[in-house]
Amino acid sequence: MTKYDFDVLYIGAGHGTFDGAIPLAARGVKVGVVEFAEIGGTCPNRGCNPKIALDDPVVVQRQQEALTGHKQAPIDWSAAVAHKHDVIKDLPDMIEGFITSHGIQVLGGRGHLFDEHTVHVNGVAYTAEKIVIATGLRPHRLDVPGTELAHDSEEFMNLPVMPKSLVVVGAGYVGMEFATMANAAGADVTVIMRHDRALRQFPAKYVEFVVADLKARGVKFVTNAEVAEFKRTSEGVTVETDLGSFDAEWVLDATGRVPNVQNMGLEEIGVEFNERGIVVNDHLQTSVPSIYASGDVIDKTQPRLTPTAVFESTYLMHQFAGDTTDAIDYPVIPHTTFTSPRIAAVGVTLDDALANPDLYDVAEHDISQDWYRQVKNEKGFNAIIKNKDGLLVGAVEVSDRAEDVINTLSPVIELKLDAAQLERIITIFPAIANDSFGQI
């Protein structure tokens, strides 16, 4: 029998790794983790955690406006960034402590695949029976002259002072969320879009509610524009497009994220990948049988979100520990944009439901007519989607608390709870869960 250094060796130390690697090691499996940057990966260091720390002052600002009926002063961006640093600074050490306390060896450096069982790290070869690639995504950069003058999401979240003017290129999750924050901090914001719709993952009516709010706050949107060049000026940067020039002190390139698959030996050993990521089968196994992938680096249709990576990492743990030989069976995965107001959705989409009235029934609600939402002067609307058997199969909401509503409804969809079972669920009253169940 071949003797390997590790039973399982992970490349990358984010949620696609540690949520499964830790319980796997706790069961006696010899595990190693390769990481060249901060332990924890994107989410705690450059993504979800710092983003929500910066968003919370915006939420408070909006709540004050809703309750008082008066526009509030810009948020203190410098104080928010300082608080963000305090919130996340200890996370890498904390996560590494969890990892190493279970006997997992952390190998600092970049992992390069040498063969189907060997990874080189800083020139040293380490072998493993199974290898898991969990290298995630990185910000995409526009391939135009002057691209070095634009900045990415991590640089935005580390800005010590909010610029007076900002151009955001892109209107997906990152672009819209950070445009919201910059506007709330007092910046003059222009969003340049390649298409005519922002946040295309959500229904147009719901997105327009968010866009209209931002426009009312002074954010300018330029649609169907192609960026040709970034030029340095005495006062900042000019963004040249086919629809004209746009000046700002600072430019955010929010044109998406791309998988980290380059320069790690995938081609040499035959691991199949494309521009969307690493190709896997229904067991998260790559084209090389001993090599698997987990998290955002996978080419998949499921949302590239932290909870998805956690689910995949945990699935691999059960597979490697011998608990299951079944294919991965994804649950319904809710998703949201942390704009103000939010949009959140789960399950069958509103567009699909409306296009198939023979399969689904749709009930839309104006939440401003709900007494509980009137307590905080909330505005927005939602759609509850049922199949012809009366089971909840989808939902979408735009509101200040949309993510809480969709989190409440997701288990109903996943567990296929019928009316009799729902009657047995008693929630705290008054609360958003009670309000949400009342609409099913």
Image (cartoon, rainbow, N blue to C red):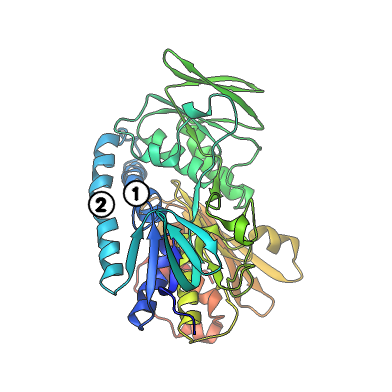
Mark 1 touches mark 2? (CB < 8 Å): yes
Q: Is any part of residue 332 visible from this angle?
A: no
Cα distance in 3D space between marks 1 and 2: 8 Å
In this orientation, which residue lies closer to the viewer: 122 or 376?
A: 122
Nearer to me, 347 or 150: 150
* Point 35% across, 41% down: residue: 65
Q: Secondary structure at mark 2?
A: helix
Question: Does label 1 or label 2 sit earlier along the sequence?
Answer: 1
36 left or right of 135? Answer: left
Q: Position of residue 92 (x, y in %)?
A: 29, 56
Q: Is residue 11 above or below residue 326?
A: above
Residue 50's disc number: 1
Relative image position of residue 280 (x, y in whole percent) = 62, 67
Asked whether, in this view, residue 317 is left or right of residue 98, the answer is right
Relative height, residue 2 to residue 111 (above, below): below
Disc 1 residue type (three-letter): Pro
Residue 233 % position (x, y): 46, 14
Is 101 on the left-hand or right-hand side of 273?
left
Q: Report which quarter residue 283 is drawn in.
A: bottom right
Residue 243 occupies quadrant = top right
Residue at mark 2: 87
- In the image, residue 137 sits, relative to residue 171, either above or below, namely below
Three-letter amino acid code of the residue under disc 2: Val
Q: Residues within 10 Å of mark 2 (few under 14, many from 20)?
A: some
Instruction: Pick the quarter of the image with the C terminus.
Output: bottom right
